[in-house]
Amino acid sequence: MSCWAVVVAAGRGERAGLGHNKVFEPVRGRTVLARCLDAFTRSGRFDGVALVLSEQEIPAFEALRGREGPFPIVRKIVPGGASRRDSVYHGLLALPEDTQLVAIHDAARPFLTDDVIDATLKSAAQFGSGVISTPVTDTIKQVLPDGSVTTPDRSALRAVQTPQAFRYDMILKAHRSAQADAFSATDDAMLFEHYYGGVKLVTAPGAQENIKLTTRADFEALAARGPADLRIGHGYDAHRLKAGRRLVLCGVEVPHDRGLDGHSDADVAVHALMDALLGALGLGDIGGHFPDSDPAYAGIDSMKLLRAVMDEVNAAGYRVGNADITIVAQKPKLAPFIPRMKQNIAGALGVSPDRVNVKATTTERMGFEGEETGISSQAVALLTRGPAN
């Protein structure tokens, strides 16, 4: 099912008082927009993101790509409109015609989780809409036109957030009608309600942390929180070299006269990294999760297994802070392939390439690596937990 996201980042964010668009503000060293795009990359649910920016801020995003990117999930950059409704409409028009589901999200909500994404998309696929919501905890007062005040039943109230997911054809039709009718809506759910009679509200773990950064106080509150929960894991793996096998390292096929022998594709570097991630969580090793006695894993791409491990990392509430991988091989020379390796690993971990290091070394012809009978790899990974990690 073709699924895209429209991420709206074209607002001026004047209430934040930062002197610039708040999505470019760092939160513990990584910008709000980068964290938002990390979440969509990490989910693995989207064919692409249409990022809506004001035209004058497109160069700022391109510079951000160089520092924290490259964000391959962003496949379209769309100039924003005069209002949020116009900006979303521009984003919708930029999507491929075969798009079936679309999630519309405010970039100022950078702490988006996979659970929230999955809940909204599942509802949209079944009912046409899926809007993430949370119970209202404050007592709400409604001021009537005559100035009198009434108190609605709090148990019947919900605060809605983004992402708001819809069947693409339905929300696009609603936006076209709104343009023709000059109908103004505060969010896409309100617009959908107006033309289709209602939306499906959904809840999911992580919704409470899916906060919107609006004012300077929001940023200051995040900065004032205590230190992040940190975990470090170490992984090691080794495989024999064997004729007739492909040599795959960090998801990159490296030309060589032999490849690594194993039940999967024997990507020794990815295996070491997976063990580091599992070790940081206290979850054993890859042999316990993907046993070589299971035919389901015969010849499997180890990058798929890495993404499965990342699902466990995210389910535990952690994110990758950084990862460092060392590949030990006498031959072949790996330097030309390392940039692609870094990109592959960064994409699977949902982080920017500057948080991934891949290096290769020899043993000066000592040991099985030096004798060219095998290749080994070691990896260290840092995991962090908390909404401002």
Image: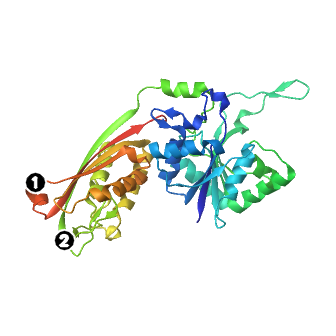
Residue 113 can be seen in this image? no
Residue type for callout 1: Glu
SS class of the residue under badge 1?
A: loop
**Disc number for residue 364:** 1
Q: Residue at x 48, y 34 (%)?
A: 388
For disc 2, the marked residue is 242
Is 94 or 315 nearer to us in this picture? Answer: 94
How far apart in space, not on screen, are marks 2 and 1 (Cα)?
A: 21 Å
Residue 146 can be seen in this image? yes
Is 26 or 140 nearer to us in this picture? Answer: 26
Q: Residues within 10 Å of mark 2 (few under 14, many from 20)?
A: some
Outermost residue to the bottom:
244
- In the shown orientation, is residue 295 left or right of residue 360? right
Residue type for callout 2: Lys
Q: Residue at x 70, y 36 (%)?
A: 155
Q: Residue at x 71, y 27 (%)?
A: 139
- In the shown orientation, is residue 26 left or right of residue 330? right
